[in-house]
Amino acid sequence: MLKKTFLLLTTLSLFTQGALATPVKRSAQDIDKEVTHLLSKMTIEEKVGQMTQITLAVILDKGSRETGDGLTISKEKLKKAIHTYKVGSILNSTATALSVKQWNRLIKEIQDEALQTPNNIPVIYGVDAIHGVTYTKGSTLFPHNIGLAATRNVELVKLTAKATAKELRATGVRWNFDPVLDLGVNPIWSRFSETYGEDTYLTTQMGLGTIQAYEEDGLENTTAVASTMKHFIGYSDPANGKDRTPAYIPDIVLWEKYLPQFKAAVDAGSSSIMINSASVNGIPVHGSKRLLTHLLRDELGFKGLVVTDWEDVIRLHTRHMVAESPREAVRMAVDAGIDMSMVPKDFSFYEHLVDLVKSGDITEQRLDKSVAIILALKYKLGLFDNAYHEPEAAKNFGKAEYKNLALKAARESITLLKNANDILPLPKNAKILLAGPTGHSHAPLNGSWSYSWQGDVEANYPEDEKTILDAFQKAIGKKNLITHSYAGFNNEKNYDVKGLIKKAKKADYIVLALGENAYAESPGALDDLNLAKNQMQLAQAALATGKPVIIVLAEGRPRIIKDIVAASKAIIQAYTPGSQGAQAISDVVFGDYNPDGKLPYSYPQYTGDFATYDRVYLNDIQQLTPGEMSYNGYKPQWPFGHGLSYSKFEYSKIKISKKVLTGNDELTVSALVTNTSQFDAKHAVELYVSDIFASVSPAVKRLKAFKKIKLAAGQSKRVRFTLTKADLSFVNPELKRIVEAGEFKLAIGSEQINFTYQL
Ligand code: BGC
């Protein structure tokens, strides 16, 4: 009976050559059978080809790279990739965004070729749809993860991810290299905005929501894409702050803070994982059998696809200097446990791996393991049934509801850092001077992965997308807005101090839009986290006018602004809020939205002090003068979790269900939260746990739960959380997660209560 089903499915696949309209849900058993059968027919070369991923540029006509919709695939290069090198996967885009139609055409051309190979195996195409569909014209761009984490609203984050999945699938691409599960603990690192911030629990919840949204409908369906948790593991805290450079993270910390989010994502069934390009404790992760096989496969039980990052196999030879030759680099990475190499600019991986297998240095059985995983993912995604773009999926592109979602997410992300004497919201009939380099540009609001890799090409942004200036003009009318923000972050008129001083004379308030231009990955490297000098000068000049200054920050990472904090009346962190960010900022500034974002990181005050909120007590010790100790080591500009509202909240009446928690029992803790203001609000309530004494120095506190609630003016709500033993656990020196008996403190807002745990 099984055999019959298998034959039927195979015949159907061949017959239709990938044109089934209705998605086919295959059982795991069927997929296994199909894969085993296919593997039995494949040559070594075909298997190695499946493990090879190249970038789109490799198959494009010469000169077509910059041409966007005029982009053309070279038939000859495509044939070489697909037939000579039997390539199983392609990634990436060109320098400009393509239309959905163009993507559809591209995918069709590639699949037409792939389906003519002896075993008719479709190509799996992957891209980085990092905060919306990066490389497609007309897609909706949402806030980056750092802003999404500030919303503390997993349900909302799931909706944004679902919209991304739908828009991506509409292009014909079914594999997304997202979400980033790296911890944002090093604010100078140029990929900080791609993280959910410094906390493991927050990262886990946001990451899980995203993965669920991508995959929960079933990969065969037109509303789903395969997710990629990345970058496994320890990528985000390079010792010198530069991208793709060594991190030194003790195992006990790696296991405690960097591993749980990956473990949770593995358990949730994320389809693939991408590896950290750099090294941890001297060992390049791409060459680490300990991390890729013993930890990821054996301990975490990951069954999905392990893809390398860009060029990272050859770099074991060229950068890390751990492999004496390119061939040895390939052997090392395959032996360590990778399934697919993002080669991506040539066929060297293919050539070396074929040679390694033929000469017996790598077994064919080893290839089979990886190829089985790759083929299974292709089956799950329905590529064997219809490798082309799906008309059903195309209907889901560009819906108006995504824009509303982007606005909602941007509004909920925006974090009010300071609001002296409740100066915000500003009256709409006042005269406002808008100045600063992020006031009339799109790139700083969208950041990396926005219609191009770097996201810094203003011309790529949709014509109807608003800048802060556009949104302000709409909110208060042209006559109330004096402008000193000009298109283009680097436009020197943005830094004209004299002009600003002159225009300030007629203004009641100055809104200064500062921050960063867009950048992605290594090109965003910084040597100095201080906000750029020309912006600081602008701010000093604005403050010197004596007019009230409101600072709006559009920045992927927290730039140090200590010297202008005290004199500024209000400060708003907008992160990189995406396509509706300008509207959201305007809504907050003029009171059309009551802000509720909370910092997902400790905003540093000093360049030499990046302590995270969950530090241990010893981190706080400072010897100010010989013999005199103090506990003031954690002094961020604003702590993790900080975020003001136009409302005021009071916490009271904390209660726990029992004083002593035993074994695997649960404990409920709740507190009453009251909105004492006249404004309706949303508010994120957080629960922190502190282990008072433990055999490994305990963190001062750790976030263990959060809930976003709505509170009308004057309304009170009791907010409840449930804790289990797992929430009290920590990693011991043997790298085992354990729980010790003893006293714990719980904190919800200003309320605190202790309980005891008994084994
Ligand atoms: C990045 C990855 C990304 C890949 C493909 C690399 O440079 O590190 O995060 O998925 O490129 O674009």
Image (cartoon, rainbow, N blue to C red):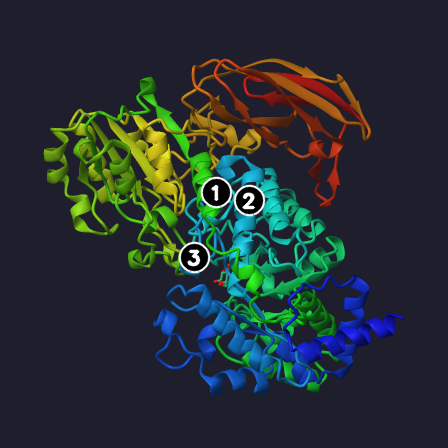
Left or right, 47 with respect to 52, comes to right
Left or right, 596 with respect to 471, comes to right
Task: Name the residue at the right extreme.
Answer: 1
Nearest to N terminus: mark 2 or mark 1: 2
Q: Residue at x 50, y 47 (%)?
A: 195
In contact (CB < 8 Å): disc 2 and disc 1: yes
Estimate the spatial distance between the alpha carbons at disc 2 and disc 3, rounded to whole Å: 26 Å
Left or right, 724 with respect to 649, comes to right
Quadrant the N terminus occupies: bottom right
Instruction: Note whether residue 13 is visible.
Output: yes
Q: Quadrant of residue 450?
A: bottom left
Mark 3 and ligand 1: say if the CB distance to the nearest ligand atom is below 8 Å.
Answer: yes
Q: Is residue 111 above or below residue 695?
A: below
Nearest to N terminus: mark 2 or mark 3: 2
The disc placed on residue 521 is 3
The residue type indicated by label 1 comes to: Leu
Depth check: 203 or 634 in front?
203
Crowd class of label 1 (few under 14; some 14 to 19; many from 20; radius 10 Å): some
Quadrant the C terminus occupies: top right
The disc placed on residue 159 is 2
Q: Position of residue 419 (x, y in %)?
A: 35, 23
**Closer mark to the observer between disc 1 and disc 3:** 1
Mark 2 and ligand 1: say if the CB distance to the nearest ligand atom is below 8 Å.
Answer: no
Identify the element where label 1 is drawn. Answer: helix
The residue type indicated by label 2 comes to: Leu
The residue type indicated by label 3 comes to: Glu
Q: Is residue 388 above or below residue 442?
A: below
Depth check: 18 or 376 in front?
18
Q: Position of residue 404 (x, y in %)?
A: 45, 42
Crowd class of label 2 (few under 14; some 14 to 19; many from 20; radius 10 Å): some
Identify the element where label 3 is drawn. Answer: loop
